[in-house]
Amino acid sequence: MQASSITFALGGMVFGLVVGWIVGDQQARRAQATAAAAQSVTAAPAQAETRQAPALDEQKAAALRSVAEQDPRNVRVRAELAHLYFDAERYQDAIGWYEQAFALDSKNADVSTDLGVSYYYTNQADKALAQFDKSLGINPAHVKTLLNQGIVRAFGKQDMAAASESWQKVVDAAPGTPEAAAAQRAIESLRSAAHQAGGTAPAGK
C-alpha cells in the first residue's frame, strides 16, 4: 500500500505519543521527563498556523544579543537565544543562532539536534535529517536525535519503515525510560495503522 495512506491512518495515533519530544531541549524545559510528558503533543508546522504563537521576550532577547555581540565565541548565550526564538515559534531566527552555536561547538549533539528540529519546522525535512546524521556522528545513541529522526522520517518523508528503525534504536538504547516507552508505543501504532489500512507493518522487534 502507499506510504501516504499509512501516514494518514497513523497520524492521530503516533502524534500524541511521540511528537512532544521533537522540540528537544526546549520541550524538556516545559515538561518533566515523565511518561505523561512523553504523550504531550507539539503542533506540526501545518498546525501551528491555526493558533497564535507565544510572544517573544524581547527584553531578554535584546540582553542576550548584547552579550553575544560582545562575546563572539560564547556558545551558551547563542544556544539560549536560539531556544528563546524557538519557544516563540520564530524558527528561522532560531536557526541562525543554532547554526552559530554549532559552528562554535561542533561536538554538541543537543545543539545539533535542536538545529535539525528547527529545519524541520521550516519544512526542510532533508536538511533536518542531514543534521540529525551529524548529531548521531557525535553520539550514535543520542536518544533525542533518534526520536526526532523517527518523527521526521515518518511525517516529513512518509518512510514508515525507517521511522520504526529509529524508534527501535531508542528502545534499545534507553530501556525503561519515558523516551523508550514513547518510541515503543509509536512502533506499535505504526503496526496497528498499517494493519488497519491493510498493509504490511514496518519491520522491527
Image (cartoon, rainbow, N blue to C red):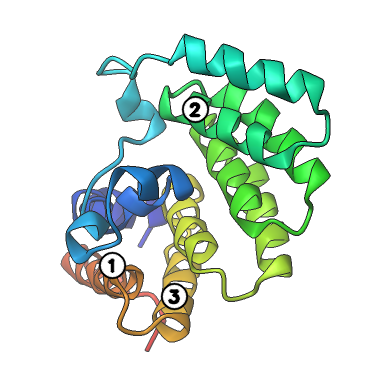
Q: Identify residue type, mark 2.
A: Leu
Mark 1 or 2, which is nearer the eye?
Answer: 2
Q: Residue at x 62, y 42 (%)?
A: 115
Q: Identify residue type, mark 3.
A: Val
The kind of secondary structure element at disc 3 is helix
- Label 2, label 3: how many angstroms apart (C-alpha)? 27 Å
Which sits in the foreground, 45 or 85? 85
Q: State yes or no: discs 2 and 3 in contact (Cβ < 8 Å).
A: no
Crowd tier of the residue under label 1, counting other residues whose Cα lies within 10 Å: few below 14, some 14–19, many 20 or above:
many
Q: Quadrant of the C terminus?
A: bottom left
Which sits in the foreground, 110 or 4? 110
Q: Say which residue label 2 marks.
A: 84
Q: Is residue 29 left or right of residue 81?
A: left
- Label 1, label 2: how many angstroms apart (C-alpha)? 26 Å
Q: Residue at x 24, y 45 (%)?
A: 41
Q: Say which residue label 3 marks.
A: 170
Residue 90 higher or lower than 122, as above or below: above
Ranked by sequence position, the earlier of labels 3 and 1 is 3
Residue 194 higher or lower than 79, as above or below: below
Q: State yes or no: discs 3 and 1 in contact (Cβ < 8 Å).
A: yes
Q: Residue 182: give its label.
A: 1
Ranked by sequence position, the earlier of labels 1 and 2 is 2
The kind of secondary structure element at disc 1 is helix
Which sits in the foreground, 56 or 169? 56
The kind of secondary structure element at disc 2 is helix
Mark 2 or 3, which is nearer the eye?
Answer: 2
Ranked by sequence position, the earlier of labels 2 and 3 is 2
**Residue 20 locus on image (x, y percent):** 31, 49
